[in-house]
Amino acid sequence: MNPNELLAAAEAVLFAAGEPLEITRLAQSLEIEPEDAAELTDALAASLERRGGGICLRRMDGKAQLCTRPEFGTAVRAALEMKQNTPLSAAAFEVLAVAAYHQPVTKAYIEQVRGVDCNHVVNSLCQKRLLEEKGRLDLPGRPLIYGTTEEFLKCFCMESLEELPQLPETFS
């Protein structure tokens, strides 16, 4: 395939996937090297930006996805009759911060840091797919451990957790 066809094929694959697609999987589908696929997604992101259309390409932790540009979210929700998500509470932001910086974490750890019960908040964040169960600790009671999700990265426009701001030494 010539470069324009390859760019169009990558766009078609990412559009059809709907969900974030691993760059290595994109490379396999296009029969190219993963490094070339990563460069191809960069070129596609730049092409979409130049076009100024309604979609953009987001990269998250070695994956890529075509998304609606944020400025058109209201129109898309209205067209699809989606409910506007309720804003996150201060408690939800606190739980997300603890989880993002210290994951994997247990509810007990989050409660220790926050000083209050967080069962409802953690369950709510799991329903919103911002947190997910990552397994269980090998301790008595085998408590669940939680971590952030790809949805968390998308919501906060990050490619990976490495983009989180550094914590002051007093909080580390």
Image: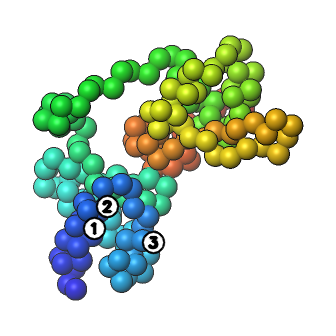
Q: Are marks 2 and 3 in contact (CB under 8 Å)?
A: no
Q: Are marks 2 and 1 in contact (CB under 8 Å)?
A: yes
Say whether residue 165 is left or right of residue 35. Answer: right
Name the residue beneath numbered marker 1.
Answer: 13
Height in image: 94 above or below 57? above
Name the residue beneath numbered marker 3.
Answer: 24
- Quarter containing the C terminus: top right
Residue at the far bottom in the pictured view:
1
Front position among marks 1 and 3: 1
Residue at the far top in the pictured view:
116
Q: Out of 169 and 13, give the one closest to the viewer.
A: 13
> Which of the two labelled residues, at mark 1 and mark 3, occupies the earlier sequence position?
1
Percent position of residue 119, x then y: 63, 22
Mark 3, secondary structure of its residue? helix
Mark 2, secondary structure of its residue? helix
Quarter of the view holding residue 59: bottom left
Q: Amino acid at mark 3?
A: Thr
Distance from the alpha carbon under mark 2 to that under mark 1: 6 Å
> Which of the two labelled residues, at mark 2 and mark 3, occupies the earlier sequence position?
2
Distance from the alpha carbon under mark 2 to that under mark 3: 14 Å
The residue depicted at 45 percent of the width and 71 percent of the height is 24
Distance from the alpha carbon under mark 1 to that under mark 3: 13 Å
Mark 1, secondary structure of its residue? helix
Q: Amino acid at mark 1?
A: Val
Task: Please say whether residue 164 is visible from this viewpoint.
Answer: yes
Label 2 CA crowd tier, 10 Å (few <14, some 14–19, many 20+): some
The residue depicted at 42 percent of the width and 67 percent of the height is 23
Percent position of residue 50, x then y: 16, 55
The residue depicted at 63 percent of the width and 30 percent of the height is 98
Residue at the far right in the pictured view:
140
Percent position of residue 36, x then y: 38, 76
